[in-house]
Amino acid sequence: MTINTTALRAAAYRGRLRWWSELPLIAVVYTLYSGARLLVRGAVSDAVSHGADILHDEQLVHLDPERWFNRLFANHAFLGVPADFAYASLHYVVTPATLVWLWRRHPVHYRRARTWLTISTLIGLVGFTVLPTAPPRLLTGGHGFIDTMALYSSFGWWGSDASAPRGMGHLTNQYAAMPSLHVGWSLWCGILLFRYGRHWPVRTLGVIYPVATTLIVLGTANHYLMDAAVGILVMGLGFALAGPALRAVDVLSVRLGRAGKAELASPASTAGAVR
């Protein structure tokens, strides 16, 4: 019976990862994502102004497909309703599912991927607080966008306040459009599924998911094209910083480990043990 060397390495690496330390870390990231969006609730006028500026800049360079996709989704329920369900739920399902998949099937790559996701999310949260931005559906002044979440609210669990569950709209901030972490997280999932998937359906999903997510956030009028582009940029920054961050953590762990061993081996510790 032949034992695969890669499988042995993966099992050994997984043994150094503990679910009881990983799970709280992921929970903290999700909590920060949801909670930090509440920090800018009072800056409505600034958020609307920032959103209008983004749309104006896109129109200047003729890169403003949001309105066309929004009309398409608003006029055809068979597109709009599934898109609203996807916008309200998939990033909370596919992202952790991808993490679990990496943990089980590709544990050697899990730690870097988790760090990449964490850093990118934290960068995105800085964007939410520094640049509050109204999504297209909340722009004033007759820009012509239709809030599909409100239009099709009778089909889902959400009410008229974005993707918040019915009656809980006051617990969310709708002015955190920049950057689009929906797009950023979907790109993270797509890259990992395409790179490490062993079967063509998984790799195909890796291509389709981020593309579909980008079309969904535009069609539901929840994000601008620029939001999506900055979401991709944020993921790029997170990827670039993940390696140095992990190396810094490893160096610190080694130093702390040595300091602990030195303390245990010190004469004072030995004397105390003898007594």
Image (cartoon, rainbow, N blue to C red):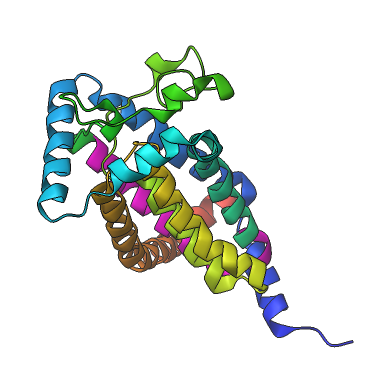
In this view, the residue farthest toward the top is: 167
Residue drawn at point x = 24 percent, y = 41 percent: 126
Q: Is residue 43 visible?
A: no
Residue drawn at point x = 63 percent, y = 65 percent: 202
Residue drawn at point x = 90 percent, y = 87 percent: 1
Q: Quick check: 83 left or right of 245?
A: right
Q: Quick check: 103 left or right of 61?
A: right
Query: Is 110 a magenta residue?
Result: yes
Q: How many marks?
A: 0
Q: Quick check: 159 left or right of 18?
A: left
Reply above or below: 189 against 149. below
In this view, the residue in front, 213 or 236, is 213
Residue 259 pos. (x, y %): 41, 60
Residue 166 pos. (x, y %): 51, 16
Magenta-tinted stretch: 103-128
In this view, the residue farthest toward the right is: 1
In this view, the residue in front, 225 or 27, is 225
Q: Is residue 132 visible?
A: yes
In this view, the residue farthest toward the bottom is: 2
Query: Is 232 a magenta residue?
Result: no
**Prevailing secondary structure of the magenta residues:** helix
Residue 78 pos. (x, y %): 56, 38
In this view, the residue farthest toward the front is: 75
Quarter where residue 256 is shown: bottom left
Reply above or below: 53 against 272. above
In this view, the residue in front, 107 or 79, is 79
Q: Quick check: 111 left or right of 47?
A: right
Residue 207 pos. (x, y %): 50, 65
